[in-house]
Image (tube, grey):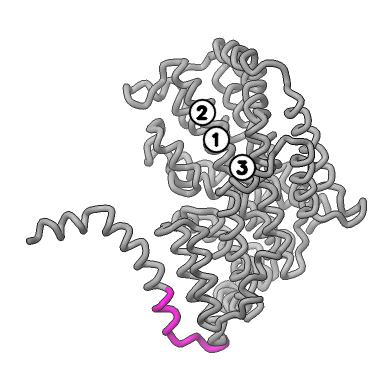
């Protein structure tokens, strides 16, 4: 009699059941708890739905888009928000910027431009292992403004390249040869993406969300401001990271003379640069120009620029309409992102975020803003250990910590930039921190202990580079 029950408890059915039970239970418990003094019942009920949604986003009992639809329906049927308020996220310009950026990323991959850039850097920099690592870093950096998915870059472009290099040098995860070169390159490939996602507004799906939330309190993080603020600490991090990995997790092979030849052969197979690749390149250059200078030229917003890019790719035939409507990943992201943005916005408007900020601020109000922000920043950064999604973490923690930081006297722009960048950089910490992490970890080249150890070392470097050096750079720019 016990055997079927034991089998069920240890099987997939039980895990799926728990994946449903946990977010629902959390939402119900919070819903029926009395709200604290200063929080309205409406705000408290929205918090209950929001927390259940965040947990469901992390453990994924059903796809995230489906979770979002369920959350939206619950929000409206429970009279927590009206249907117009519930659907407001879908008309938000930030949602369309994110959606359009993913469509553009599809075109970068479809045309072969992403692969050509990767092999070009490999051919130029691949003569030794350290510089081969910098080739991977350069590839990710170049692609990041036009590809808002770390998973698309790290798992879709960089990972296959790294795996082929490891195989070429007979460095495999299953025969004890992973430390030859594979482990080092796998680490570089993953960690480069955690830096590049911080460097551009369009480099990661949650960045526009954080910019929108910062804008709600009067801090303008447009594309140009974000990129300019990130360029110095970002470049320093991109230079330092491979050196740190080389010092603490060195490859056994130092020279890689075959790598440029391998890249050359792949480029020959690809043939000459095709017309659609040139069109893709020209579109990216136009987008970067308008993202930087669109407001000066006539108040052209980032979302308008991204939609212009999609329109040009459709008109020139780089993308077909079927490419757009069949890209289920993009529309899945559009649905859950818009819903998350809506809930985070109304938590602020209904007064919960200001209340939480005041409560947290009371805990550090006896400290100077520098020490208070350092305490908040460290707690915020290492809070990543409790999340498996940067987007979920940004929605759950960014607005509250930003409001608290400002309430204790932190310059608003410094707080908004630092916390936005730290969300991205904290992906370095664990082998489950992002959607691309399981791809690299699952390849078997890096064990969990090594991954976490290197993550701690890199995190210390990043906190110094971005909070200290970055702070001086932002002060020099006049941002703070």
Up the image or down, 92 lies above or below 30; here it is: above
Callouts 2 and 1 close, C-beta under 8 Å: yes
Which disc number belongs to residue 353?
none
The quadrant of the picture occupied by the N terminus is: bottom left
Q: State the residue at coordinates (48%, 31%).
A: 186
Up the image or down, 215 lies above or below 274; here it is: below
Residue 132 pos. (x, y %)? 58, 22
Q: Secondary structure at mark 3?
A: helix
Which disc number belongs to residue 160?
2
Which quadrant holds residue 189?
top right
Q: Is residue 35 left or right of residue 132?
A: left
Nearer to us in this view, 284 or 413: 284
Q: Secondary structure at mark 1?
A: helix
Lower position in the chain sequence, tag 2 or tag 3: 2
The quadrant of the picture occupied by the C terminus is: bottom right
Task: Give the magenta part as a residue range.
Answer: 27-39
Q: State the residue at coordinates (65%, 46%).
A: 324
Nearer to us in this view, 237 or 135: 135
* Residues at marks 1 and 3, CA–CA distance in whole angstroms: 17 Å
* Residues at marks 2 and 1, CA–CA distance in whole angstroms: 7 Å
Which quadrant holds residue 344?
bottom right
Lower position in the chain sequence, tag 1 or tag 3: 1
Residue 309 pos. (x, y %)? 77, 44
Q: Which residue is mark 1?
A: 156
Query: Which marked residue is nearer to the observer: mark 2 or mark 3?
Result: 2
Nearer to us in this view, 216 or 53: 53
Q: Which residue is mark 3?
A: 195
Callouts 1 and 3 close, C-beta under 8 Å: no
* Residues at marks 2 and 3, CA–CA distance in whole angstroms: 20 Å
Specify few, some or many for label 1: CA neighbours under 10 Å numbering under 14, 14-19, or 20 or more.
some
Q: State the residue at coordinates (46%, 56%).
A: 63
């Amino acid at each position: 009699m016990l055997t079927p029950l034991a089998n069920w408890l240890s099987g997939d059915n039980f895990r799926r059941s728990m994946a449903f039970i946990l977010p629902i239970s959390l939402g119900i418990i919070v819903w029926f708890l009395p709200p604290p003094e200063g929080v309205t019942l409406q705000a408290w009920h929205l918090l209950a739905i929001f927390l259940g949604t965040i947990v469901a986003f992390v453990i994924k009992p059903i796809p995230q888009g489906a979770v979002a639809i369920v959350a939206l329906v619950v929000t409206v049927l429970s009279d927590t928000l009206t249907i117009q308020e519930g659907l407001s996220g879908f008309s938000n310009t930030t949602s369309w910027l994110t959606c359009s950026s993913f469509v553009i990323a599809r075109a970068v991959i479809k045309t072969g431009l992403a692969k050509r850039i990767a092999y070009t850097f490999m051919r130029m920099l691949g003569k030794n292992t350290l510089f081969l690592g910098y080739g991977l870093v350069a590839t990710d950096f170049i692609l990041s403004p036009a590809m808002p998915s770390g998973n698309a870059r790290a798992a879709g472009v960089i990972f296959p390249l790294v795996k082929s290099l490891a195989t070429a040098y007979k460095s495999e995860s299953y025969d004890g040869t992973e430390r030859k070169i594979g482990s080092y390159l796998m680490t570089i490939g993953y960690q480069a993406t955690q830096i590049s996602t911080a460097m551009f507004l369009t480099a990661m799906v949650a960045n526009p969300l954080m910019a929108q939330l910062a804008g709600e309190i009067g801090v303008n993080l447009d594309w140009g401001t974000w990129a300019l603020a990130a360029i110095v600490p970002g470049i320093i991090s991109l230079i330092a990271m491979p050196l740190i990995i080389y010092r603490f997790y060195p490859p056994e092979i130092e020279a890689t003379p075959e790598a440029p030849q391998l890249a050359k052969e792949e480029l020959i197979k690809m043939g000459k640069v095709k017309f659609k690749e040139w069109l893709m390149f020209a579109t990216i250059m136009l987008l970067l120009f308008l993202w930087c200078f669109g407001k000066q030229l006539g108040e052209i917003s980032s979302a308008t620029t991204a939609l212009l890019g999609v329109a040009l790719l459709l008109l020139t035939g780089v993308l077909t309409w079927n490419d757009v409507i069949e890209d289920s990943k993009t529309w899945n992201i559009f649905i859950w992102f818009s819903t998350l943005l809506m809930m985070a916005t109304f938590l602020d408007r209904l007064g919960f975020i200001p209340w939480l900020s005041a409560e947290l601020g009371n805990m550090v109000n006896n400290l100077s803003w520098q020490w208070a922000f350092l305490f908040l920043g460290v707690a915020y950064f290492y809070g990543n250990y409790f999340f498996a999604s940067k987007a979920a973490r940004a929605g759950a923690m960014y607005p509250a910590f930003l409001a608290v930081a400002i309430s204790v006297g932190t310059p608003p722009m410094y707080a908004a930039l630092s916390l936005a960048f730290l969300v991205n950089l904290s992906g370095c910490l664990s082998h489950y921190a992002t959607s691309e992490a399981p791809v690299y970890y699952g390849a078997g080249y890096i064990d969990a202990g090594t991954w976490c150890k290197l993550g701690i070392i890199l995190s210390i470097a990043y906190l110094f580079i971005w909070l200290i050096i970055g702070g001086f750079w932002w002060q020099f720019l006049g941002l703070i």
